[in-house]
Structure formats: structure tokens, C-alpha cells
Image: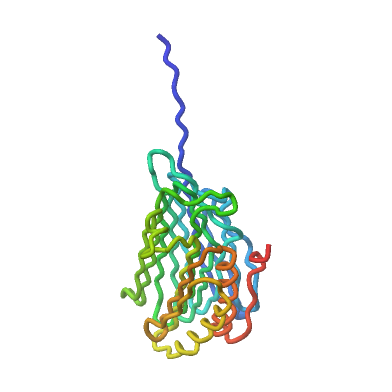
Amino acid sequence: MNQSLIYEPNLSWPASLRCGFHQTSTGGTALAEVRHSGPLRVQKLFHDQDLAHCYVLHPPGGMVSGDDLDCRFHVYPNARVLITTPASGKLYRSRGSGSLQTATATVEVDDGGMCAYLPQDTIVFNGANGELETNVSLSSLATYFGWEHTIFGRSAGALPFMTGQLSQRLTVYRDHQLLYRDLLKIDAEVLKSRSGLGGMTSLASALLILPAGAQESDALVESCRLSLKAFQGISGVTAIRDGLISIRLLSTRAEGTRIALEQLWSPVGEHLMARKVENPRIWRT
């Protein structure tokens, strides 16, 4: 009896990206090292004076079961870069097997370097099973500002988040010593619980870390709170210690959270760069 071969396609689509940012002889920042595999790319840098804007592209636009994205960014001494994405990321409904959709970002910043890791929001579809992880390694004289904005369900299409789960982890080391760790695990029950998100579907967390010994937290906290004054949701800005500031936003309107985050970059960026800063042009498209 003849037997035909059954073709079973690889249902996962892993991708990786490695970027190294160096200070140039003129004081700017250049993308001096880049390697990639799978559907991850980086555009040519845009520049706001001595601050480079780097856009990370994931052409599929969303992740299904088995997909694994791994991005690694190294900011060398005195380089300064803002890393963002051109559009929302998406975690689609998981297959029946329940296999994960995972995305990991690793950021390393050397002395005198500054990294603002500010990706646009991630939409978690009903039935998704995702893990998002960010690992940050700083030297004592490095600066970092990063945020995560997660949207559960799609209110515009009346497609609420009813099943599934998301795990988010953020770990920060300074000089190889643990400085900060945050872990969130959210499912439909946590989303609707009064002790969880209280039914609010737009959640954002930001973290600002200044060089060791910095004593500028009070002024920055007040600037951030003033920037969020018009935000129609729940917000909090806390100096955990000098030079370590945590910011949380929770609302029912994803667009309002997105605008609040973009506006937050102005006072933070102005402080970090000691001048006025521009928002990435991709945020306006």
C-alpha cells in the first residue's frame, strides 16, 4: 500500500534582533551593530539632535501560539537612544494546545548612556496566552526610562477579554545587583475583580531610573504628576527611592492612556536631555 507523507507546517515563527548603539565622534548616536533573524527589523535611525530614535518593526503585526520574539539592545557609553514601535503589538487567541506567545526585551546601558524604551501598546485578544518579559541591566552611571501599555480585549469591536491570561515581568539590575522587580499575572478574573483592575482594560506601567546618587526625584515626581493631571483614569507617581520612580496608569480608555504616556515623555525627556525633546514622528501616524 502506498503511504503519502503528511506535511505538518511549523506553526511557530521565532524572531530575534540584536542592536548596539555607539556614541559618534560628533556626540550623536549611531546604530553600529545590528543582527536579526525571522520577522524582526529595525529602520534607519531618525534623530532628535543628539538623541537617536529607533523603530523596531515586526511585520506580522501580531503573535500567535508558539511565536517567540527576542530583542536585545546594548547602549554603549554616552550613547542616547529612544526605542519604540510603529504600531500596536497584538497577542491573538491561543490555539487549543494553549502554547504560549512570548516576547522578551533585554536592555543593557553602560556608563553615561541613556535608553528610553517606549514601545506602543500591546492588545491582548480574548483567549490569548502571553508572556512579556523585560530585563534591564544598568551600570551605576546609566539612565533608563521605560514603559509598558497593555490593552485587554477590543472594545471597538465589542470583543471583551473573557478568557486567557497574560504574564508581565520586569527585572532591573544595576552593577549586577538586583534593583527592582515587578510581576503581573492577569486573567479574566483579575481583570474584573475589584481587588484587581476593577474592569478597567487599559493598564500602563513606567519606570524611571537615574544614575546612582541622583537626588532629583522630588522635582521629577511633581513634573510627572502635573503632566498626568488631565488623565481621566487612575494614576500614581511614586519615588521608591532617590532616582527610582514608578508610574502607573489605569483606565477604561486606551486612547487616553496612550496620549498620557506620550505627554509624559516631554517632562521626563526634557530632564534627561537638559533640553526640550521631540516625540517620535511614528507616534503621529
Percent position of residue 271, x then y: 55, 85
**Residue in the image at 39% along x and 71% along y:** 137
**Residue in the image at 65% along x and 72% along y:** 47
For the view shown, which residue lies furthest in the front direction?
194
Vertically, is 271 above or below 34? Answer: below
To which quarter of the image does residue 107 belong? bottom left
Percent position of residue 183, x then y: 35, 64
Vertically, is 4 above or below 178? Answer: above
Q: Nearer the viewer, residue 17 or 34?
A: 17
Vertically, is 3 above or below 277? Answer: above
Residue 107 located left or right of residue 79:
left
Q: Quadrant of the N terminus?
A: top left
Vertically, is 269 above or below 149? Answer: below
How is this picture coloured?
rainbow
Percent position of residue 160, x then y: 50, 51
Q: Nearer the viewer, residue 5 or 199?
A: 199
**Residue in the image at 42% along x and 84% along y:** 243
Q: Nearer the viewer, residue 4 or 37?
A: 4
For the view shown, which residue lies furthest in the top direction?
1
Percent position of residue 281, x then y: 67, 68
To which quarter of the image does residue 55 belong? bottom right
Total numbered circles? 0
**Residue in the image at 58% along x and 74% along y:** 29
Q: Quadrant of the C terminus?
A: bottom right
